[in-house]
Image: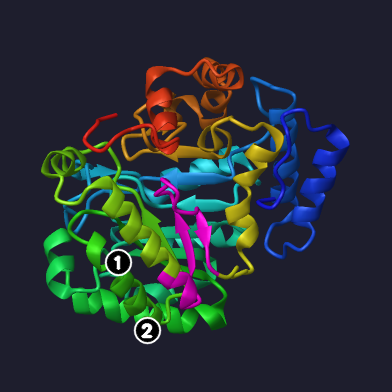
Amino acid sequence: MSMIVEAPGIDRARMRAAIAAALEPDVILDRWQRANVWAKAEDLLERRMRWSSLPFRLMVEFNRRCNTHCRMCPIQHSPTEELSPTSFERVLDEMGPGVMEVVPFLSGEPTLAPLPEVAAILRPRNIFFSLTTNGERLDAALWRGIEDVTARVNVSLQSHRRDLQEQLVPGLSFDRIVENLRRLAQRSADAGFDLASSCVVMHANARELSAHAEFLAELGVRRWIVQRLYPWGPYHAEEGRSRSIDDVEEVDLVAAAVERAAALGMRVESNFGRGVPALSGPDLPTRFRSLDEQRFLVDLVRPGFCASLASTAVLTATGQLRPCCRHPIDLGPFEQLGFLSLWNGPAMQTLRREHFDRSLRPACRACTAYYAEEMPRGASA
């Protein structure tokens, strides 16, 4: 799907042919998940307010705890709030089949959640984890209990230098993270899961990004995610005030690092923008590619509609259903009111109408502006 970009006036026959072509090589999705892809396409094409389709992806906040506080992270953690695996399983039972992916990451470190217990819930439903983790706790023992239901692992590593990594991500062992990342790189080829490492571009690490790419390549990591510094927290404003690296130099540094990584055979994904390509380097197909590519369905069928709103739902540790991980738009308590009633309730229908009509509320406009590269360094969403 990612290779097909159609005009808003795409006809039904061409749309169906494109989706069928994208699904044809898939070996992961079951018949219910495939049916959900088709249902999503129809919901978007027909501009429906009540959807027969389910989200492809659930972001699940099993807890709000973390074993560090990254310097660039704006999240306020909590030691008490939790969503139990039992409550999560009840939601899946209510939804029925169709969900493909669970992302146990929102306001906490996912490896602090009971991942093996959750894996037992996902396994018979053909649902897979997508993990974003700081990597310190993802040792061999934990990994053995979840490998068969894990599609993608993204280990955040902000620097290849121990001193800088531990400055930006305090309290964690650099050596342990690197050891776990090396082991995962060795396993990924045989087990078939997609391994990536990510970093956030900051003034502190920008001048060493090319060396960082070389370090990852030596570990065996073949996919690198290079991210912009999000504007939702104080560190973004702090960098805007310091101006230790100007915008032109920063772009040049990132572009050079992306080019170096691609030359080393790495696939680079980036939301940095400002002329830095979103995808660089060789294509690295995996058997889980269809999970990642479902988001392109939105651009195919309804360009401009928010991909998160169309394909994702968020379950918070406080029991709220949200349509988005960026802004706290609470639709209601899913355990008391039920997931399906909220998924097609008045608040969700209003959001869908706003996005179909492109009459966005301020929070959505701010998010759209950020991804359209319209928000300068130091601004706040």
For residue 188: magenta?
no
Q: Which residue is mark 2?
A: 218
Residue 83 image-quadrant placement: top left
- What percent of the width, then of the height, locates residue 40? 69, 36
2 or 1: tag closer to the N-terminus: 1
Q: Coloured how?
A: rainbow
x, y percentage for residue 337? 47, 24
Q: Residue at x 40, y 79 (%)?
A: 217
**Residue 267 horizontal side relative to residue 17, left or right:** left
Q: Amino acid at mark 1?
A: Leu
Helix, strand or loop status at disc 1: helix
Residue 124 position (above or below residue 178): above
Q: Nearer the viewer, residue 175 or 210?
A: 210
Q: Is residue 71 left or right of residue 32?
A: left
Check whether the beta carbons of the residues at disc 2 and disc 1 lie within 8 A of each other: no
Residue toward you, 27 or 251: 251
The magenta stretch is 260-281
Measured as percent of width and height from the top left, residue 280 is found at 52, 62
| Residue 128 visible in this rendered orientation of the protein | yes
> Residue visible at 63% across and 42% down?
96
Residue at 43% in and 79% down: 185
Q: Secondary structure at mark 2?
A: helix
Q: Is residue 254 above or below residue 304?
A: below
Residue at the spot of label 1 = 209
Query: Which mark is drawn over residue 375?
Result: none
How far, Cα to Cα, is label 2 from label 1?
Answer: 14 Å
Label 2 amino acid?
Answer: Glu
* Residue 187 at x, y percent in the picture: 47, 82
